[in-house]
Amino acid sequence: MNITKSLKTAAVVSSLALTTVFLSGCGGVSDAQMKELNDLRASVKSLEAQANSLKDERATLEKKVEEQNRKLAECEKQKEETRANLEKLPK
């Protein structure tokens, strides 16, 4: 029982050691990769700013459409009232 336990422990420790060595050997970012990453970050920031600007513009346009629809509804109401009043006039 103790031998099995010690073998499992040794296997886990050696696995961790090999993983650490492997990952540390593969680590490292080149200057080109760092520049590309920074360029991508700048691009994302620019696109987010553009998206926010477009959202603001959309909200403004939606308010204008809502105002126009309100005015149109008011005109329709006046039109119906005028029709009703014209029908009441003697012929």
Image (cartoon, rainbow, N blue to C red):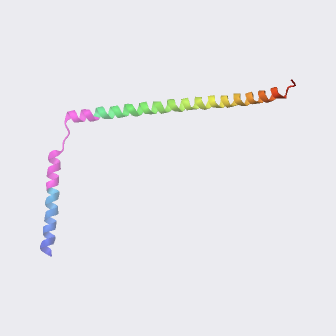
Does residue 79 show up magenta in the picture?
A: no
Q: Position of residue 20 (x, y in %)?
A: 17, 53
Where does the image place residue 53, in percent across and percent down from the top left?
Answer: 46, 30
The percent coordinates of residue 7 (x first, y second) are 13, 68
Nearer the observer, 80 or 15: 80
Residue occupying image coordinates x 15% and y 61%: 13
25 versus 15 height, above or below:
above
Q: In this view, does 39 lie to the left or right of 67?
A: left
Quick check: 12 above or below 58? below
Instruction: Please determine whether, in this image, residue 3 is positioned above or below residue 87.
Output: below
Q: Is residue 11 left or right of residue 63?
A: left
User: In the rendered image, which quarter is residue 77 located in?
Assistant: top right
Hey, which residue is sitting farthest right in the picture?
90
Foreground residue among 59 and 11: 59
The quadrant of the image that shows the C terminus is: top right
Say which residue appears at 43% left-offset and 33% top-offset. Answer: 51
Magenta span: 18-37
Query: Looking at the picture, how far across and down is residue 48, in whole percent?
Result: 40, 34
